[in-house]
Amino acid sequence: MKGWMGKLKVFSLLGFLTFALAGCGKENLSALMPKGYSAHTSMKLIILTAVIMTFVFLVVMVVYVIVLLRFRKKKGQEDYIPKQVEGHVGLETVWTIIPIILLLVIAIPTTIATFDLADDADASKQINVDVTGNQFWWHFNYTGDKVQTSQDLYIPTGKTVYLHLKSSDVIHSFWVPALAGKIDANTENTNTMKLQADEEGVYWGKCAEFCGDSHSLMDFKVIAVSPDKYDKWIKDMKNFKPDQKPETAAAQEGKDLFKDKNCMGCHAIGSSPIQTAPNLTDFGNRTKLAGVKEPTKENIMKWIQDPESMKPGNKMTGKYPSVSKDEAEKLAEYLMQLKPSDVTPKSVSK
Ligand code: HEC
Ligand SMILES: [Cu+2]
């Protein structure tokens, strides 16, 4: 009896932790707190399915307990066998029909929602963004506006944005839990998905398909701003002149180093056909460095000198001449002042 109680305690503790820890986690990173049209649609289906499944579970449990109590072998009933009911036409019919009905109740709204979310009939009238998944970062190309960025995707609140997803290497999966379901980024075809956010905010995104060493570090953000701010962002990004002279001397030296150290062989600043590395046009406004680290000067310097220590297996390591601490500082100064626009929310949840 004692050992049994011990086990019960462990199980209750585990049960408690499950509920308590389920409350931890990042803001705007939960499908259970939907903030956009697709996510609301999924949430309704989750609730419908959970209610039906709970109902089935309870009915089965109640019947199970009744049967256990009622048909137990009682004292003095040595050869007791309850009445056998296999092949009972009534029962068989009932427990075939009821599950069919329940499955239909789940299947019909699910199918309607699937077609609704896949409907891209009005795509040409909306904002369209080509999204490319790369080991281990995301590229965003606003095709209609000749604006490019990486890691942080800007969208206007309340509007439907169409994403056309591809991959440049292996299969990735684009997932912003609070806004929509997952969709694969493949090399051989383009998948389209709709994204819409109800309110302004920074929504966390994850790659949801194992894609290599730093798969778990392939984070990105969707930054939803009011339509006015979005228009300003696009305008600012378009008007940005990559050749513009940086304000400080250190940043100017950094700009020269950016050429000399071959950074430009992979990274573009401004709209460019080069998409082998994150587009750094608005790097100074990034919510994170390389998707995961705080974009402080120290971290940026560390990244430039030794990206491997932050993101194992990344495609930058070893592909450029070594950079001294002093040079890294100048490069960081240059990159941090690349801020074409000021619409990025100030209080980014980190
Ligand atoms: C061989 C191509 C290549 C070269 C050359 C290169 N990089 Fe990179 N860089 C990358 C790739 C790929 C990433 C994305 C890594 C990841 O997140 O997985 C990256 C990421 C970065 C980032 C983070 C970007 C972000 O969006 O947060 C910075 C900053 C950066 N590189 C700076 C530099 C500097 C400075 C140089 C020159 C000294 C340089 N890179 C040279 C390929 C390159
Ligand atoms: Cu990935």
Image: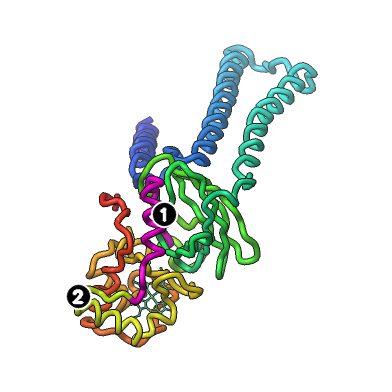
Q: Residues within 10 Å of mark 2 (few under 14, many from 20)?
A: few
Q: Magenta residues, as a range?
A: 218-243
133 w.r.t. 268: above or below: above
Q: Amino acid at mark 1?
A: Tyr
Disc tally is: 2
Instruction: Give the SS element for disc 2.
Output: loop
Query: Which residue is pictured at 35% across the width and 46% down the height?
Result: 201
C-alpha gap between disc 1 and disc 2: 28 Å
On whether ligand 1 comes within 8 Å of the CB at mark 1, the answer is no
Outermost residue toward the top in this view: 76
| Residue bearing mark 2 | 248
Residue 152, position in %: x, y?
40, 58
- Counting from the top left corner in percent of width and height, residue 151 is at 41, 61
Mark positioned earlier in the residue sequence (1 or 2) = 1
Q: Which residue is mark 1?
A: 154
Is 258 placed above or below 21 here? below
The residue at 49%/72% (across/down) is: 275
Which amino acid, by three-letter code, is at mark 2? Thr
Horizontal and vertical percent position of residue 338: 30, 68
- From the viewer's perspective, is 52 left or right of 247? right
Please report contact status of discs 1 and 2: CB closer than 8 Å, yes or no. no
80 sits to left or right of 323: right
Which-is-in-front pick, marks 1 and 2?
A: 2
Residue 106's spot in the image, x, y percent? Answer: 63, 31
Q: Is residue 165 left or right of residue 299?
A: right
Which color scheme is applied?
Answer: rainbow
As rendered, which of 114 and 52 lies closer to the eye? Answer: 114
Any magenta on residue 230? Answer: yes
Q: Is residue 209 visible?
A: no
Image quadrant in which you'd find residue 82: top right
149 vs 245: above or below: above
